[in-house]
Image: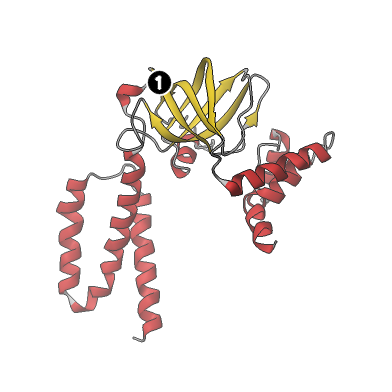
């Protein structure tokens, strides 16, 4: 086999390893990986004809390690339901609803600890009747009540827990007693702030246009301005994916 064929087989083998892990109902423990996968990987290396399949086990190990790292950054069970102090940077464009505002926070410290085992790097918060809408990149401190990511398991329904996992969100919760304070002017996430500026400029330019949310989604990939009826139309026509990738494509083109 030439080099291109070897690389092609290796790529497919690694992809197959990733799919094996993704297809499992639960993530296996490290002990299972050591007792089952490692001996098979060693045996594959010893047999010359199957040596190329070592990439299958590399794919299994890489996917398992990545998933295990994300799970380790989920909120520790003993912190659920407690009043906690968290500081960090607003890491998404806040979504305004009639009774609350929701946004993501890149955690600096939670309960006096930096992100690590049991302390998420990113959380999703709701703030009821916020005294001020936080802007992307701003540095804030909140008093919150959190829980581990969870979602309904209805067949055919939206997998909210899976969405949180894919976005690296280790806890969800809400701001309590309206206790919040902006700390300083050390802004972060310049690209997110630029996208936010474009998003709100479109909203202001098209205040009464029902397609303002669609225009913003096509421009910067932010979909919070699209209502449920429009979403159903995009899903039924198979075009919903365009709203996810168009913002990236337009950014690359410009």
Q: Position of residue 105 (x, y in %)?
A: 50, 34
Q: Residues within 10 Å of mark 1 (few under 14, many from 20)?
A: some
Q: Is residue 32 left or right of residue 196?
A: left
Q: How many marks?
A: 1
| Quadrant location of the C terminus in the rendered image | bottom right
- Quick one: which residue is furthest to the bottom in this view? 2
Label 1 sits on a secondary structure element that is strand
Q: Is residue 101 left or right of residue 85?
A: right
Q: Position of residue 145 (x, y in %)?
A: 44, 20
Badge 1 is on which residue? 84
The residue positioned 41% from the left and 25% from the top of the image is: 147
Q: Is residue 15 above or below residue 210?
A: below
Q: Is residue 111 above or below residue 224?
A: above
Q: Position of residue 198 (x, y in %)?
A: 72, 45
| Quadrant location of the N terminus in the rendered image | bottom left
Front residue of 240 and 95: 95
Q: Position of residue 50 (x, y in %)?
A: 23, 74
């Amino acid at each position: 086999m030439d080099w291109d064929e070897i690389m092609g087989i290796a790529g497919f083998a690694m992809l197959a390893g990733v799919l094996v892990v993704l297809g499992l109902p639960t993530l296996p423990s490290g002990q299972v990986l050591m007792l089952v996968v490692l001996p098979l990987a060693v045996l594959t290396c010893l047999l010359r004809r199957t040596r190329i399949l070592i990439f299958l086990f590399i794919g299994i190990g890489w996917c398992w390690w990545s998933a295990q790292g994300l799970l380790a950054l989920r909120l520790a069970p003993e912190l659920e339901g407690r009043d906690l102090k968290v500081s960090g940077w607003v890491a998404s464009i806040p979504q305004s609803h009639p009774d609350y505002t929701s946004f993501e926070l890149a955690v600096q410290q939670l309960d006096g600890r930096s992100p690590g085992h049991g302390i998420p790097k990113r959380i999703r918060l709701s703030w009821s009747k916020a005294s001020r809408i936080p802007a992307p990149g701003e540095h804030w401190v909140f008093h919150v009540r959190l829980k581990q990511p969870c979602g309904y398991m209805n067949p055919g329904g939206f997998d909210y827990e899976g969405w949180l996992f894919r976005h690296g969100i280790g806890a969800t919760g809400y701001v309590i007693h309206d206790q919040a304070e902006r700390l300083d002017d050390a802004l972060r996430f310049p690209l997110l702030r630029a996208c936010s500026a474009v998003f709100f400029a479109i909203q202001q330019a098209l205040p009464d246009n029902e397609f303002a949310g669609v225009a913003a989604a096509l421009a910067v990939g932010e979909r919070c301005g699209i209502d449920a009826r429009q979403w159903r139309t995009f899903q039924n026509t198979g075009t919903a994916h365009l709203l996810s990738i168009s913002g990236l494509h337009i950014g690359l083109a410009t």
